[in-house]
Image (tube, rainbow, N blue to C red):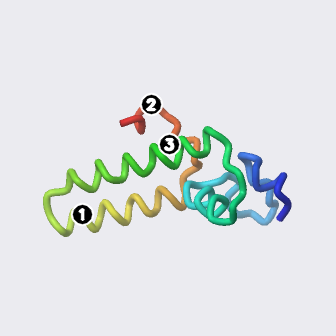
């Protein structure tokens, strides 16, 4: 995959799969030493903060595990732009 394509915010793959970058996609780019845009770094930072706050709110082990799985799904299946919304600025 070209560096140009990795730096775009939209994955234009026509295979029928997701057409956006998730938080985990951004993490993978970062691990591969591909430069992230400022808004991509901010989305990761917001997600990480949100994750910690939400997990700390859980009052039982069962709720903790359910929230943990929900957050994993969000990191895998939500466009990273979701975490640029004001709701995630904690």
Q: Residue at x 81, y 54 (%)?
A: 5
* Disc 3 secondary structure class: helix
Q: Relative to residue 49, is residue 82 drawn left or right?
A: right
Position of residue 43 relative to residue 75, above or below, is: above
The answer to whether the residues at label 2 and label 3 have Cβ atoms under 8 Å apart is no
Q: Residue at x 58, y 60 (%)?
A: 27
The answer to whether the residues at label 3 and label 1 have Cβ atoms under 8 Å apart is no
Instruction: Where is residue 79? Give x, y as percent.
Output: 59, 49
Residue bearing mark 3 = 83
Residue bearing mark 1 = 64
Q: Residue furthest front?
A: 33
Toward the viewer: 20 or 6? 6
The mark that comes first in sequence, 3 or 1, is 1
**Mark 3 surroundings within 10 Å by alpha-carbon count, few (fewer than 14), some (14 through 19), many (20 or more):** many
Image quadrant where residue 6 sits: bottom right
| Distance Cα–Cα, label 2 vs label 1 | 24 Å
Instruction: Where is residue 43? Give x, y as percent.
Output: 53, 44
Which label number is shown at residue 26?
none
Residue bearing mark 2 = 86
Q: Residue at x 73, y 48 (%)?
A: 10
* Disc 1 secondary structure class: helix
**Mark 2 surroundings within 10 Å by alpha-carbon count, few (fewer than 14), some (14 through 19), many (20 or more):** few
* Placement of the C terminus among the 4 image quadrants: top left
Toward the viewer: 42 or 17? 42
* Disc 2 secondary structure class: helix
The answer to whether the residues at label 2 and label 1 have Cβ atoms under 8 Å apart is no
Instruction: Where is residue 39? Give x, y as percent.
Output: 61, 39
């Amino acid at each position: 995959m070209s560096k140009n394509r990795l730096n775009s915010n939209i994955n234009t793959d026509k295979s029928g799969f997701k057409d956006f970058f998730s938080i985990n996609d951004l993490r993978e780019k970062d691990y591969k030493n591909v430069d992230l845009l400022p808004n991509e770094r901010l989305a990761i930072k917001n997600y990480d903060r949100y994750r910690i706050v939400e997990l700390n709110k859980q009052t039982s082990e069962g709720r903790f595990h359910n929230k943990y799985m929900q957050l994993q799904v969000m990191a895998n299946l939500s466009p990273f732009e979701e975490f640029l919304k004001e709701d995630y600025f904690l």
